[in-house]
Image (spheres, coloured by chain):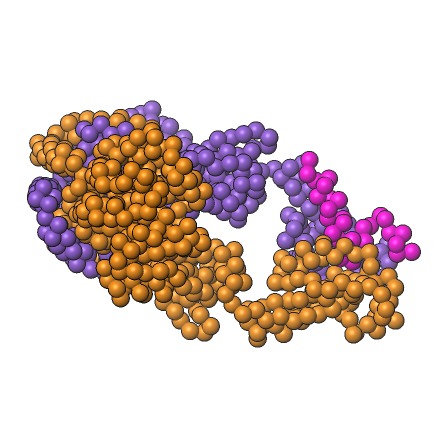
Chain colours: A purple, B orange
Amino acid sequence: MIISIIGGTDGLGKWFAKYLSSKGYSVIVSGRDKEKGEAVEKELGVIYTQDNIEATKKGDIVILAVPINITEWMIKELAPHVRENCVLMDITSIKEIPTKAMLKYAKKDTFIMPTHPMFGPSTPSLRRQVVILTPPTKEHENNPWFIKIKNFFEEEGARVIIIPPEKHDKIMGVVQGLTHYSYIVLGSTLRELNIDIKESRKYASPIYELMINIIARIIGQNPYLYADIQMHNPQINDIHQTFINECEKIKEIVENNDREAFAKLMKESSKHFGNETIKGMNYSDKAVGAITREVDKLKKSIGKEAGLKHAYSNKVHFGIVKDVVDDFIILDKQGKDLKLSIANTNLMTKEELKQWKEANLKKYYNDISFLFKDNIDIDIILELLKSKYNIEIIDVYKGAPIQEGYKSITFRIYSFKKQDLENLRSSLIRTVENIGGIKRYNTDILN
Amino acid sequence: MIISIIGGTDGLGKWFAKYLSSKGYSVIVSGRDKEKGEAVEKELGVIYTQDNIEATKKGDIVILAVPINITEWMIKELAPHVRENCVLMDITSIKEIPTKAMLKYAKKDTFIMPTHPMFGPSTPSLRRQVVILTPPTKEHENNPWFIKIKNFFEEEGARVIIIPPEKHDKIMGVVQGLTHYSYIVLGSTLRELNIDIKESRKYASPIYELMINIIARIIGQNPYLYADIQMHNPQINDIHQTFINECEKIKEIVENNDREAFAKLMKESSKHFGNETIKGMNYSDKAVGAITREVDKLKKSIGKEAGLKHAYSNKVHFGIVKDVVDDFIILDKQGKDLKLSIANTNLMTKEELKQWKEANLKKYYNDISFLFKDNIDIDIILELLKSKYNIEIIDVYKGAPIQEGYKSITFRIYSFKKQDLENLRSSLIRTVENIGGIKRYNTDILN
């Protein structure tokens, strides 16, 4: 099966190209920028073409991953070129306009699949991500293509929601439109008031800090995507106006020093939220506590080894934690101090660091043979030794030249540092000799 | 030293009463509601009086923890009763008005300490919390009382900031005023638009969910406190108006479909944020990921033991994780299914659960003696056994009737479940016999 992604050299289109190709699908991406396209071809091992029509003709599934403002136009241009009985899918964040356009321009035998993946290209996988499908009719929902694609998302761990395109746009007007709008307004207000953001963090309550972080998250992204989400939603005007009305209402209450009206308004909102109020309070505690808890863990690990994974590059740094100061952690990495920003890195669990080392570092080893009495359960010995060493058994041997009643066990002991092997070897010999083992080639004790 | 807390039967006043009394200070609380006061007296082991003046007269430090709107009036009433060379402190979230009032009404020998603890009563300790002090003059800053109180906060791990009261109110107008205002407006807008909050979560992006949780956190609290923070800040009108202007500006840009103007505005905000943009994006990832990560950990622990601590009651539940469904975790607690909300509980680390069990559960134990060769290093043996058992050594013995060349070691093995002891005992015997130990009173092997 070939999946063609129009606009697959960037953003969420590129994300799908990577994801689908890692799942074994043949992926073709198209995009205007040839240099970028060829880089993506190399990076992901997919096929790139500059020609959207060529990509469209080759795909069993054609995914449109182009900006909202040109989606309708692209559907008109490409729909006639989709192969017989194949799929035309779009992944824009609005659904009414593209669904209508696909209905209008797609051939009769083309199956249309209007889709809104509710996540951005920084998401690691589909797990727990929401994917909204807006089939225009019941017939669409029963089409084998629909079922196949829906099942794919669900098998990958996504939460699939099926609603009509109009309902989608109404809800999204709030979930995306209002959310983005209010944080963009906040960012703009802070600029107008000329607030020094870094300085203001010093006085920050946890909620202010969280708000600043969310504003930053939004204003730091592609502004055209956010513009289009606002501008192509037919509901957005109404939502903006309602928001402004509430602003005015509350401003006036404050000007009038009307405590009772203020309290009434807050209580009514809380009542409207219902059970979601207490649930939200608790979940916000978890969000607020996320950073504090990480800093606490880092402080507790001073003097011990810790691994930190960079948020975007995924590069791993590990070493002995020397200190935690403000937003930074000082790591002793093989004798050199390394200063890492807590914002940009994530603390790995011991298990994660161990797995990462196993997969990425060169391991050195040493083999040592011991004699044990023949009736000893070697699994018990190994279990105990594993709590202290990175170790396995590579050989068990009985018979000549081993004396009767004994067996020879050869352990392989590993280290990520060559210079530690000698000490580990001595330590292992000492430990094993204390639990009944006798080092071989040193067997005078037996005679 | 006696610390009197006026309004110490509720909210942050009660929080300080509990905290200071746990640190060994004698605490007196006063408050209008006698029933509540007597309950607090019992709960915290402090002294309650209904009479504010009596409480004021007895304290070395008198802390005013009353609502903002009556703080000025209370200062006027109580300041004359503060004992000679003692301290009058307020802990309201505005500082210009109370500082001026204390300067006006306090006696010459009274040391005034305007303070703004920037946290709520759900905070577990002072660690990493911001406390703002607004001494009106340099002279105040050098007063021994000032240094003493400042040192107390810092020793408890708080981050102390010293600024003039006017600057405090200006910054707080943004950090608290604007933050609260925008989330209260959002809550009110969602109510006006009649959005079903629970239903809307289904379509939620991580940022919408976080926003909903923060709105809930704010609208779920005491509205009069929030009203007073808005109404007593001289800067707030200006801030509201700037916010509304930005709302109008962006609404118009969207109406005009002016993508370039929208992008320019977002970019300007991002430029104003500077380095804080990327920092905020990364920190928001941590906040957004906090819940996902917890759910992932819970899912990974299906079939294993987990401990969950209730967010407010601190009650601990532990058992085998059976399943994780939506916002709930199903725990097998001694054969009975227990359904816990993930929102209301926090997953404990293995170490935390272990420590909690040590502190809270009855431990059962069994003693078993073994003979080891005299030259065995028993510390090595114990270290290995501790990786597998909850165990300690309670006796080491040499001499008659123990045969020469041997020593007797008595282990004590623990379990939180009495019915498991027998199996643990058999397992320990099997293990120790495989690492060179010989069970005593069973010593025919030696002869």
Is residue A430 part of the magenta span, yes or no? Answer: yes
Give the dominant element type of the magenta stretch: helix, strand or loop.
helix
Q: Is residue B267 visible?
A: no
Based on the displayed image, in which of its 4 quarters is residue B339 positioned? Answer: bottom left
Q: Is A70 left or right of A207, judged from the image as shown?
A: left
Q: Position of residue B234 (x, y in %)?
A: 16, 36
Residue visible at 23% across and 45% down? B75
Foreground pick, A222 / B123: B123
Q: Position of residue B84 (x, y in %)?
A: 34, 44
Residue visible at 16% across and 30% down? B262
Q: Is B100 left or right of B39, judged from the image as shown?
A: left
Residue visible at 45% across and 42% down? B155
Q: Is residue B339 visible?
A: yes
Q: Position of residue A237 (x, y in %)?
A: 9, 41
Q: Position of residue A137 (x, y in %)?
A: 15, 55
Based on the displayed image, in which of its 4 quarters is residue A416 positioned? Answer: top right
Q: Is B399 left or right of A34, judged from the image as shown?
A: right
Based on the displayed image, in which of its 4 quarters is residue A206 positioned? Answer: top left
